[in-house]
Image: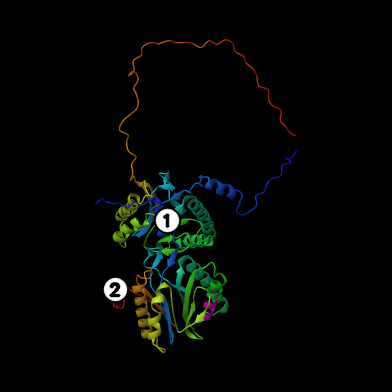
């Protein structure tokens, strides 16, 4: 039997998808509000085509001490948007003389994501705590809509867990229950979605600020693995 | 008297004059020359005393090696250097512009430049050009908050990590870094690991090759080692086509002198200046 060696033409090399693809945060992100704050969570994988460019990404980006955003979509677009919103909110905080509202941050996100909707690929969940309304979660998906929800999921991995979250969400969960809810959801999403993986980064935002946790791959809740 | 020729001030923006001609030529079988790309393997990581950056030295133009010993480690500030992969022209211009902006910033603030500043300036510029500037960079340096290494992608996203690799040979380099990197490495170990990572790219990626350049940045100084290792030596030609004097025998000799018949000297008059 003749031995066939597959020849790799240079055009293959020059057009490998990880050389030419844009950097995207494949992603599974989530945020849940509870009485007294919010729990936010994200996976840690940034993919360029089929190559994992960064396996320990931090997708929970600070906007103010009490407001964070979860980024999904194009890494460049979301980093740029988050930087701009951060700038606006810092300025606003100085002008106001007190901590800004989560709704304000969400509105600034919405303004950018809606007005530049054709040029951007950004799905953002803006969540935090403020003195007036407590814990809030605002979901700002691709087109630039902004809607407040008790919990929100986003990113490519979210499609696999809509059923799980819809059946397992309960009103009036406390902080620990929310943390478990987020962990289980993200673990399920990460196990099914190729563009999500790595570790789970959690943030618990309350009146006292943010408490950050990292849950490593082997510490995540385990489900059916075949 | 002033010239009557009208000075042609070029209008801003892209000139489409040659597009039709270029299309015609491409259809006739003369495609436009490809931009020189630094195919490349670049990597950077943090070690005990600072940051180490490494790069190969091959620049390619399509399938041809355009430059066997090009320099991919660019100076940004005395404490910050940048390795670049992508389109050679874009990299050169971007890093030159950035380094001058950083110098102005340093004069403005009176302080040593932070790596985060360079990172932010670069990402904002690249994002503004929406990825059309083909510059993928590994930025490394040491400032008052410690050593930092960031990778910056052409679309404007950045990742700050303990070790990074970019370019077409990045997968090979990353394989070495993932298995060999540990926190607080000594300088000697770090050099060996970086050399291995870049050589991984040089020998396994067609678009990377030639030699290994290193740049070691510590609190005291930034040291450029070029080349750190000559990984690919040009082969010695074994035979010679030179014939030594006297190996061909002379059979006969005839000398024919050239006779000078006459010599004429003619001075060249100076041309009068035309001031019309």
Please say whether residue A106 is one of the residues in the magenta stretch: yes
Q: Which residues are magenta?
A: A101-108
Label 1, label 2: how many angstroms apart (C-alpha)? 35 Å
Is residue A101 among the parts visible in the rendering?
Answer: no
Task: Name the residue at the bottom extreme.
Answer: A172
**Is label 2 in a helix, a strand or a loop?**
helix
Report the mark closest to the observer, 1 or 2: 1
Q: Looking at the image, tell me whether mark 1 or mark 2 is earlier in sequence order.
A: 1
Residue receiving disc 1: A15
Q: Nearer the viewer, residue B45 or B42?
A: B42
Please tell me which residue lies in front, B4 or B39.
B39
Which residue is located at x 33 percent, y 44 percent? B232
Q: Is residue A110 left or right of residue A30?
A: right
Callout 1: chain: A
x and y percentages locating residue B126 in the rendered image = 50, 60
Location of residue B121 with respect to A171 vertically, above or below: above
Helix, strand or loop at label 1? It is loop
Q: Quadrant of residue A39?
A: bottom left
Q: Nearer the viewer, residue B115 or B181?
A: B181
Question: Height in image: B212 above or below A203?
Answer: above
Q: Residue at x 43, y 79 (%)?
A: A31
Please name the residue that numbered disc 2 is placed on. Answer: A218
Instruction: Give the left or right position of residue B45, taking residue B6 as reference.
Output: left
| Label 2: chain letter | A
Image coordinates of residue B96 in percent, x first then y, are 50, 52
């Amino acid at each position: 039997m003749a031995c066939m060696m597959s020849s790799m033409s240079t055009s293959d090399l020059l057009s490998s998808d990880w050389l030419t693809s844009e950097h995207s945060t494949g992603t599974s992100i989530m945020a849940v509000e509870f009485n007294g704050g919010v729990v936010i969570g994200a996976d840690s994988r940034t993919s360029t085509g089929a190559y994992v460019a960064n396996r320990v990404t931090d997708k929970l980006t600070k906007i103010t001490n009490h407001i964070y955003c979860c980024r999904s979509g194009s890494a460049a677009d979301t980093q740029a948007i988050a930087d701009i919103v951060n700038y606006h909110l810092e300025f606003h905080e100085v002008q106001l003389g007190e901590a800004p509202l989560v709704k304000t941050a969400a509105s600034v996100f919405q303004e950018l994501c809606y007005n530049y909707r054709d040029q951007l690929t950004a799905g953002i969940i803006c969540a935090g705590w403020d003195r007036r309304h407590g814990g809030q979660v605002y979901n700002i998906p691709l087109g630039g809509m902004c809607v407040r929800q008790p919990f929100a999921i986003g990113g490519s991995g979210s499609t696999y867990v809509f059923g799980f979250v819809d059946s397992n969400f309960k009103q009036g969960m406390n902080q620990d229950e929310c943390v478990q809810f987020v962990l289980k959801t993200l673990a399920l999403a990460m196990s099914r979605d190729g563009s999500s993986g790595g570790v789970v980064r959690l943030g618990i935002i309350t009146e006292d600020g943010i408490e950050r946790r990292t849950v490593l791959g082997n510490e995540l809740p385990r489900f059916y693995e075949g | 008297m002033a010239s009557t020729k009208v000075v042609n001030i070029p209008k801003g923006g892209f000139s489409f004059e040659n597009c039709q001609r270029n299309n015609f030529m491409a259809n006739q079988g003369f495609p436009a020359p490809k931009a020189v790309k630094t195919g490349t393997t670049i990597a950077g990581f943090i070690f005990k005393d600072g940051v180490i950056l490494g790069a190969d030295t091959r620049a390619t133009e399509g399938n041809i090696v355009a430059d066997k010993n090009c320099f991919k480690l660019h100076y940004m500030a005395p404490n910050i250097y940048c390795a670049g992969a992508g389109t050679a022209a874009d990299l050169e211009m971007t890093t030159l512009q950035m380094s001058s902006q950083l110098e102005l910033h340093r004069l403005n603030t009176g302080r040593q430049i932070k790596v985060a500043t360079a990172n932010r300036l670069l990402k904002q510029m690249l994002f503004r050009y929406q990825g059309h500037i083909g510059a993928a960079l590994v930025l490394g340096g040491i400032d008052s908050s410690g050593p930092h290494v960031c990778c910056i992608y052409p679309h404007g996203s950045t990742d700050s990590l303990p070790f990074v690799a970019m370019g077409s040979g990045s997968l090979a380099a990353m394989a070495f870094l993932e298995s060999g990197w540990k926190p607080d490495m000594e300088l000697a170990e770090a050099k060996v690991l970086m050399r291995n990572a870049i050589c991984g790219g040089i020998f396994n990626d067609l678009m990377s090759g030639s030699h290994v350049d290193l740049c070691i940045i510590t609190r005291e100084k930034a040291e450029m080692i070029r080349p750190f290792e000559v990984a690919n030596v040009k082969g010695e030609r074994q035979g010679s086509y030179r014939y030594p004097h006297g190996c061909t025998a002379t059979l006969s000799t005839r000398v024919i002198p050239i006779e000078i018949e006459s010599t004429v000297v003619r001075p060249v008059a100076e041309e009068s200046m035309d001031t019309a």
